């Protein structure tokens, strides 16, 4: 019916049957044959726009159009056509935009706007042409670019380096000790060592806030990372062992000496990107100088390197280098100032007679000269003046620079500012802090009369003491009461003791300063203060000023080890171990005194393991650190284990020491150390008759430690 309807020349308008229909009638545009004036077979059979209705084919033309009707009818959506043509939407009712209603003439009779230009064969509108260069999905290789792909570790070294970068990204003061142990276990070859140092250096340069933390990490790694054999030279001679400190020093030196080349390369950078590149070069140079200075403050680098760096930067007369000099001299970390340390040490060259103070004075004279003659900005001039003020204040900064802190340090600062919290871990209360004792004293004043604790002693035994108290406290029969009479005023904090405090004060005054009780109390207070401050020199001075006899001095090491075993935090454990070793290294104690204090705890290891399961590990770490710092050696291990009762605790201590050294320096080092000390492992690891029967044999125990090749006797 529709075909016959289309062939009628007088049907120029939409039939009434299709009015209001939801169907979209889409016509196809194609050139019409020439129309004779009289009409006929050659007449134009278009519905006013030269397009037949959809799904209609002209008689006799199906073979002439081999492509057929392959149009995408989804492209005839009204919203799509309206968006493509840019014409306003047609009338409602579901009609096509080209079917705006009746009337009108020409090709615009059924619509206010023409259809968009057609593409493709037969005038078919194609919404997506896969062969169109605009619509074609192009690969990165076709554009000369590298396609993104997830990084896949190609070797074991790459996998380890990815893990090391993950550890460094999590590094904070709170997690430092735990992550340090993980990092130490992953450095197992010379290649990993070199790449790890490069990674640490790059992060220290790029992260100024955590630079002091990376310097502390370098200090710890330089002590505990073993040396690795390097590749032989071209002539076959073996190379020098690769040590952490040597590789780190070479990295810093290469970066420092290459700064001039980076500044010279800025001339070749485009003008638009030169300022950004110059800022990056300056930031990297300042980060390297900051790291070198902090490594000197931590004791990793020698003072001669600092003098060489300062002389080189002052000779450049470049503003960035002058700023770097001010940055280096003003460094301060852990109450240790770089400027003060430079003044205390000698000159920068071997055999030089110049003292550190004279060299530092020369640096400031050079800075003054540059201020007068050089073309320096106001910012750098003020930096030089602030540095001079810092030197006049004996290198004590007016305001500490913000550094990353642990949660305990943040809590301590908040407590000091608010003045309402209790001091942490027995620390002395800061000025202005109101403690719990003050609140209790205000709520519960002292009793009337009586002793220092507020209670009276009743009876004949205490009658002599009670005669000293106020007569108003006396009752009939010569007895005293704590509830009658005149109440003494409570003693103010820090003031002189009142009548109620006189008993404790007299007892304290009568305590002999040379008595073991008094000296023990002084050592305990010294250790508490040292843990909070971290000044080993001051703690050693307090120990020397005790004037204790030689028989009492081993008590110092005994109390230090006791504090380590008493649930000490990693930072406190490190500080206490450092102080114990310093007592021997600086002559405060002899080696025999040191061993006697340590053996006090090792001899009681069997009992200590019941209360402190980690006692063998803690004592083993203390011994390993003592050997690494050359205070003890492996030959002392046999004497330490001599009086340990029971084979199980003795095996636990020796196993912790061997396992620790194997993780730090490798199996070869443990074998050579045991051989050099002629360590009788068979006797040390031997079980007693009272030990549990299910414990492994000595050979199996060494295999569990991955040290099965160790001989049991030498």
Image (cartoon, grey):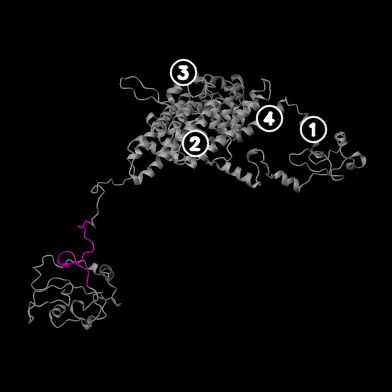
Magenta region: which residues? 114-133
Residue placed at 76% from the left, 28% from the top? 511
Which is more N-terminal, label 2 or label 4?
2
Q: Is residue 265 above or below residue 581?
A: below
In the image, residue 227 lies at what x, y percent?
A: 42, 25
In the image, residue 307 lies at what x, y percent?
A: 48, 28
Q: Local crowd at mark 3 within 10 Å, few (<14), some, or many (≥20)?
A: some
Could you give the CA–CA distance between mark 3 and mark 1, rounded to whole angstroms? 60 Å
Element under disc 2: helix
Work out whether residue 622 can be spotted: no
Q: Local crowd at mark 2 within 10 Å, few (<14), some, or many (≥20)?
A: some
Work out whether residue 165 can be spotted: yes
**Viewer-side label of 3, 1:** 1
Query: Is 126 in the magenta?
Result: yes
**Viewer-side label of 3, 2:** 2
Which is more N-terminal, label 1 or label 3?
1
The residue tagged 2 is 371
> Residue 506 bears which disc, if any?
1
Could you give the CA–CA distance between mark 3 and mark 2, rounded to whole angstroms? 63 Å
The residue tagged 3 is 675
Left or right: where 498 falls relative to 345:
right
Could you give the CA–CA distance between mark 3 and mark 4, rounded to whole angstroms? 43 Å
């Amino acid at each position: 019916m529709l075909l016959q309807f289309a062939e009628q020349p007088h049907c120029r308008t939409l039939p009434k049957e299709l009015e209001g229909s939801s169907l979209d009638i889409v016509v196809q545009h194609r050139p019409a044959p020439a129309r004779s004036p009289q009409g006929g077979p050659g007449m134009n059979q278009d519905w006013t726009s030269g397009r037949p209705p959809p799904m209609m084919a002209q008689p006799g033309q199906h073979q002439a159009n081999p492509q057929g009707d392959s149009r995408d009818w989804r492209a005839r959506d009204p919203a799509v056509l309206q968006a493509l043509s840019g014409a306003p939407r047609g009338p409602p009712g579901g009609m096509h935009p080209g079917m705006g209603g009746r009337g009108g003439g020409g090709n615009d009779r059924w619509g206010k706007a023409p259809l968009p230009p057609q593409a493709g064969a037969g005038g078919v509108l194609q919404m997506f042409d896969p062969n169109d260069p605009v619509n074609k999905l192009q690969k990165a290789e076709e554009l000369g670019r590298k396609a993104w792909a997830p990084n896949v570790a190609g070797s074991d070294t790459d996998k380890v380096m990815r893990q090391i970068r993950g550890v460094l990204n999590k590094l904070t003061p709170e997690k430092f000790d735990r992550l340090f142990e993980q990092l130490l276990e992953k450095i197992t070859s010379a290649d990993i060592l070199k790449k790890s140092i490069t990674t640490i250096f790059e992060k220290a340069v790029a992260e100024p806030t955590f630079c002091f933390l990376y310097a502390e990490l370098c200090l710890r790694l330089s002590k505990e990372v073993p040396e690795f054999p390097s590749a032989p030279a071209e002539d076959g001679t073996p190379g020098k062992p690769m040590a952490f400190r040597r590789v780190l020093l070479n990295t810093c030196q290469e970066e420092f000496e290459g700064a001039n080349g980076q500044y010279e390369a800025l001339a070749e950078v485009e003008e638009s990107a030169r300022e950004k590149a110059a800022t990056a070069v300056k930031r990297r140079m300042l980060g390297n100088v900051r790291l070198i200075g902090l490594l000197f403050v931590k004791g990793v680098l020698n003072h001669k390197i600092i003098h060489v760096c300062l002389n080189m930067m002052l000779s450049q007369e470049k503003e960035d280098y002058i700023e770097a000099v001010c940055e280096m001299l003003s460094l301060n970390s852990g109450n240790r100032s770089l400027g003060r340390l430079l003044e205390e040490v000698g000159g920068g060259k071997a055999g030089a007679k110049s003292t550190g103070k004279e060299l530092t004075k020369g640096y400031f004279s050079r800075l003054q000269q540059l201020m007068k003659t050089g073309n320096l900005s106001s910012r750098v001039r003020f930096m030089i003046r602030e540095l001079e003020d810092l030197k006049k204040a004996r290198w004590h900064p007016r305001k500490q620079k913000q550094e990353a802190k642990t949660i305990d340090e943040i809590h301590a600062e908040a407590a000091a500012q608010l003045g309402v919290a209790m001091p942490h871990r027995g620390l002395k209360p800061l000025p202005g802090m109101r403690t719990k004792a003050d609140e209790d004293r205000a709520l519960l004043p002292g009793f009337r009369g009586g002793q220092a604790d507020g209670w009276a002693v009743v009876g004949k035994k205490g009658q002599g003491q009670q005669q000293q108290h106020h007569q108003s406290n006396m009752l009939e029969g010569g007895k005293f009461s704590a509830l009658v009479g005149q109440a003494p005023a409570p003693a103010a904090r820090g003031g002189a003791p009142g009548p109620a405090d006189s008993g404790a004060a007299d007892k304290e005054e009568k305590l002999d300063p040379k008595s073991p009780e008094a000296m023990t109390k002084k050592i305990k207070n010294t250790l508490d203060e040292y843990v909070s401050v971290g000044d080993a020199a001051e703690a050693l001075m307090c120990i020397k000023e005790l004037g204790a006899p030689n028989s009492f001095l081993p008590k110092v090491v005994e109390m230090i080890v006791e504090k380590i075993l008493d649930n000490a935090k990693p930072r406190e454990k490190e500080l206490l171990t450092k102080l114990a070793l310093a007592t021997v290294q600086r002559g405060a104690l002899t080696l025999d005194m040191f061993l006697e204090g340590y053996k006090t705890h090792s001899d009681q290891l069997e009992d200590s393991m019941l209360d402190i399961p980690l006692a063998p590990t803690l004592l083993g770490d203390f011994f390993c650190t003592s050997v690494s710092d050359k205070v003890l050696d492996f030959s002392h291990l046999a004497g330490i284990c001599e009086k340990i009762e029971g084979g199980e605790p003795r095996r636990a201590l020796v196993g912790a020491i061997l396992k620790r050294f194997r993780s730090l320096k490798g199996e070869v080092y443990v074998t050579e150390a045991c051989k050099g000390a002629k360590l009788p492992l068979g006797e040390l690891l031997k079980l007693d008759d009272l030990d549990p029967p299910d414990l492994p044999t000595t050979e199996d125990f060494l295999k569990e430690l991955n040290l099965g090749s160790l001989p049991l006797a030498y």
